[in-house]
Amino acid sequence: MYLIDKPYISDFLIDTIKENNFHVVATKEAKELVAEASLNWISEEEAIETIKSNPSQRIYSNSENVLSWIDNHFEESELSKQINTLKDKAKFREQIKAIFPEFKFQKIKLENIQNITTEELSFPFVIKPSIGFLSVGVYIIKNENDWIKAKEKITPQNIKSIFPKNVLDTSHFIIEDFIQGEEYAIDYYHNDKGEVVILNILHHVFSTGTDTSDRVYSTSKAIINQHRAELEQFLSTIGGALNLKNFPAHAEVRIDKNGKITPIEINPLRFGGWCTTGDLSGITIGLNSYKYYFENTCPNWDDLYQGKENKIFSIIVLDNNSGIKPANIAKFDYKALANDFETPILIRALDINKYPLFGFVFVETDKKNKEELYDILSSDLRKYIIVKE
């Protein structure tokens, strides 16, 4: 059963739903977003009754906007409690505190942030919205100077959101230990026994030690093979603590030089946001994550990567780090951007005046040509921006 909502659904996901005759709940928002009468629409009443009579019903959401629909109709259910625990980073840390007893964190109201003194803090640390999305309001604080600069930015006047409160709520922040290591994003699901089935592992690359952007995510057979077994076991432990079954998720973790895995967050009922990571694997290697989840199947990685063992598949997130205000931008040159990549696969353009992004790019890169990924990682994108006269 699919719960569809704004801001975005891809043609790939719509085609997957249509070709497999998956149920889609006919909410007002879903109907506005998808003008496709031939989909297998079911009424909200039927969906509610189905979930109540079968709590193990498989559900997938393309957007965290729909989580409020579940909360409204199933407020006291285990599913709703699981979603709320995962979505609220402070609740999540409390839930897994026994697994990570040394990890320090605290929740704080936005209006109280200015009153925190450096004597109360332990550097380095990360501060971010307790309920967050798209790295909005996330800061890595390594010293007192970083903290002074961050406090200037984390104010009610500066922190605004186009997303619903259940997706991004800046009324409360969490201050937590800075996690060392390389960052990875994982698409996976818990099957009917609670076991973890990994569908993708992407290396989230940063330009500097204080970078918190979402610019480049890359996956390959080598990345999958290096980390899959340990991540399956790790995510199973966390899933067991929350009793997750028939449950898709998108996790972000860090792995240090000794192989220790520490969770950053786990996003419920979806893979990567804006139909990114789930679509990437389907378009590039034929692994349709949405089907794998609903059909309860496991990938055969050797078959999927046959002939593509030396390829890197990446998502480029075109966040506006140019310093140019959207109101002053005439257009973005997507053609020039595509020409800077060896094998651009797909460009998804977005309206920078409506969303905080120019869009997304899916690219294929030979492992000998990683330089193009590092170039876009550190780019301010100004070479592609045409300013109004």
Image (spheres, rainbow, N blue to C red):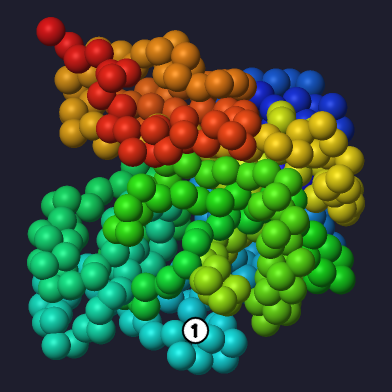
Tell me what residue is drawn at x 76 percent, y 39 percent: 309
Q: Position of residue 347 (x, y in %)?
A: 53, 21
Q: Is residue 318 left or right of residue 20?
A: left
Q: Is residue 266 left or right of residue 50?
A: left
Exactly how many numbered labels are in the figure? Answer: 1
Residue located farthest toward the front when viewing the structure as drawn: 368
Of residues 355 and 207, the one nearer the viewer is: 207
Picture layout, residue 126 above or below residue 105: above
Tell me what residue is drawn at x 46 percent, y 49 percent: 205
10 Å neighbourhood of mark 1: few (<14), some, or many (≥20)? some
Tell me what residue is drawn at x 50 percent, y 51 percent: 204
Quadrant of res 109: bottom left
Q: Position of residue 159 (x, y in %)?
A: 22, 52
Picture layout, residue 350 above or below residue 96: above
Q: Is residue 109 visible?
A: yes
Element at label 1: helix
Q: Position of residue 381 (x, y in %)?
A: 31, 27
Of residues 200 and 27, the one nearer the viewer is: 200
Q: Is residue 37 left or right of residue 182?
A: right
Residue matched to label 1: 94
Of residues 80 and 380, the one nearer the viewer is: 380
